[in-house]
Amino acid sequence: MIRKCGSDYLLQCVDIAFTRNNQPENNCAYCPKSKEGIYADLKFLIDNPGNLMAGLFDGDNLKGIFGCFINPENNWVDCLGPFFIGEWSGDDAKGMFEFANAKLPKAVRFNFYFDSRNRNLHRMMESLSAQRRDNEYILLLEKLNYKPQQIKHNIVSYSDEFENDVIQILHDTFPDSYISGRELISSIGKDRDVFCALNENGVFVGYGVLKRYKDNPDHMTAEIFAVAEGARGEGYGWALLNMAVDCALNRYNADTVDLVVDKLNTHASDLYYSCGFKLMAENSSYCIKN
């Protein structure tokens, strides 16, 4: 039987996700690796009535889970799992997705993002005729391997005067972004720092984001970098990245920084490698549109 999980099953859901998500062949990139991070995310998911935690039950025994985080601004759903206690079941995984789809009538798109070694999810995506997007590399920079780069442009910390610029350029550059401009702005100072690039006339031309994690302060993510179309190719993105990395490793004293880059974007990945980043994992991305 598949039904919604309530808060009484939170700890069991956390244990299942923690065990399976730390195995590459079962990994879901929308799920944290640490138990503390998983607990925080799943508690938010279960406590928020707009989201959904679907559970596969044998009587009262929880056998599998499938989580859905819905963005109320665009009604896109980021999918966590499916995860099972025992062996993977393609029929049950598909059943939990169909249950979630029926319970979330406003959802217009379901996003799946997972380690490319997760063959079961690849097969599930094929069975659901999901749309495959470009694979992405997860690159990791360790503090000892950082090769500082000279920052040649004027990079400043975010201030309210740049709010509309940041929102507009995010919309223009990443129309499919998992985070909206308003969500990004509201997170500044909480778990994100934003840096803004200005041209020689002091005009805003781009921004970069450093994401911090309360459950893992030693690790951070160089998350989103966007440069206005007319200013691309002039090194602003490179300057923003190095400012974010320097902030993570020196101001916050983090040990590692990661980032995501399209597998086919060899120009960008070559720059990241020159800075000291190394390949950590390859993720696959799919979406199912209603």
Image (cartoon, helix red, strand yellow):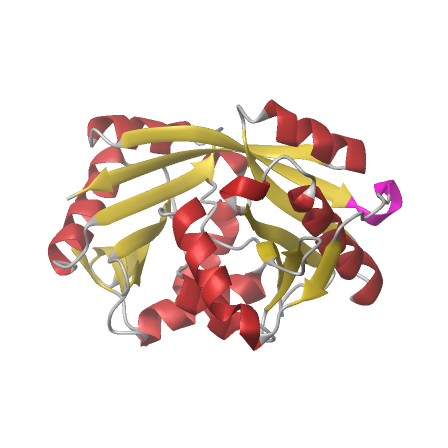
Q: Nearer the viewer, residue 60 or 248?
A: 248
User: Horizontally, is 211 left or right of 53 in the view?
Assistant: right
Q: Nearer the viewer, residue 25 or 221?
A: 221
- Magenta-colored span: 142-147
Relative height, residue 270 to residue 21 (above, below): above
Q: Can residue 89 be found in the magenta stretch?
A: no
Q: Quadrant of the C terminus?
A: top left
Relative height, residue 283 to residue 264 (above, below): below
User: Horizontally, is 69 left or right of 117 in the view?
Assistant: left
Q: Residue 200 at x, y = what percent?
A: 71, 53
Q: Residue 33 at x, y = what percent?
A: 56, 53
Asked whether residue 76 appears in the rendered view, the answer is: yes
Residue depicted at 61% across the width and 23% down the height:
266
Residue 253 placement: quadrant: bottom right
User: Horizontally, is 213 left or right of 152 in the view?
Assistant: left
Asked whether residue 65 appears in the rendered view, the answer is: no
Q: Quadrant of the N terminus?
A: bottom left
Q: Nearer the viewer, residue 144 or 37?
A: 144
Give the residue at the far front of this rendering.
Answer: 201
Residue depicted at 74% across the width and 60% down the height:
218
Q: Residue 21 at x, y = what percent?
A: 49, 47
